[in-house]
Image (cartoon, rainbow, N blue to C red):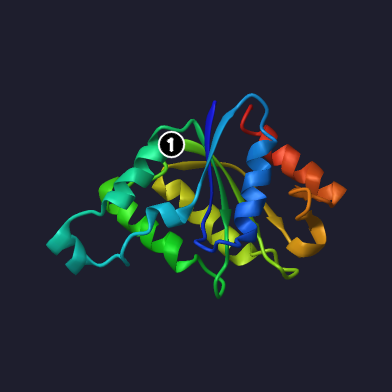
Amino acid sequence: MKIIAFAASNSRQSINKKLVTHAAGLIEGAEVEVLDLNDFAAPIYSQDHEAEHGHPQQAKNFLEKINGADALLISFAEHNGSYTAAYKSLFDWSSRIQQKVFNEKPVIALSTSPGPGGAKSVLQAATTSLPYFGATVKASLSIPSFHSNFDTATGELSNPELKQQLQAALATLKA
């Protein structure tokens, strides 16, 4: 099984990237590639830009990665209760090229934040909209209070209950 994992954030210090990298490493026997959205930075989507310049190569490259995967792990960062601008723009460009961006792939949707909300607002928005764009959401999980529940020295969840919930979510990829 080939897994593409990424954080829906372009922060170099992204806690969502730490979470999704950890989660991807727990899937036994899978070939995993963790993407960095900075490698797919595209201009902010606009119809005018599309008409003048066409689709950016970065969005085509992103779709190529998704299309080549058997499953996806995405950890959604939350900015003001919604998607990050970097993810939203890349997603918008991608959907102009291929409306079913996620190409009927199984998806595990994650989120985390420093606070007790665990980025639940963006996770709810994502799990609601992902199926419209060709994702089969197998499971979702919000990790609250990242710095209290994740050991950055080991790169692992430190909360036993959350570890178990993550394992259960990842197990849905085998079902």
Q: Tell me which residue sits at (82%, 62%) in the image.
A: 148
Instruction: Name the side, left or right, on which 145 lies relative to 98.
Output: right
Is residue 82 or residue 23 the one in the foreground? Answer: 23
Q: Give the amino acid at mark 1.
A: Glu
Whether residue 125 appears in this view of the structure is yes
Is residue 119 or residue 87 the one in the foreground? Answer: 87
* Quadrant assignment for the N terminus: top right
Residue 76 x, y percent position in the rendering: 56, 58
Q: Tell me which residue sits at (57%, 67%) in the image.
A: 78
Residue 121 sits in which quadrant?
A: bottom right
Residue 77 sits in which quadrant?
A: bottom right
Residue 110 x, y percent position in the rendering: 62, 52
Whether residue 103 appears in this view of the structure is no
Q: Helix, strand or loop at disc 1?
A: loop
Instruction: Name the side, left or right, on which 2 lies relative to 97.
Output: right
Residue at the spot of label 1:
104
Residue 12 x, y percent position in the rendering: 55, 61
Is residue 11 or residue 122 the one in the foreground? Answer: 11
Residue 155 versus residue 14 in the image, above or below:
above
Disc tally is: 1
Q: Tell me which residue sits at (63%, 39%) in the image.
A: 24
Q: Tell me which residue sits at (31%, 56%) in the image.
A: 93
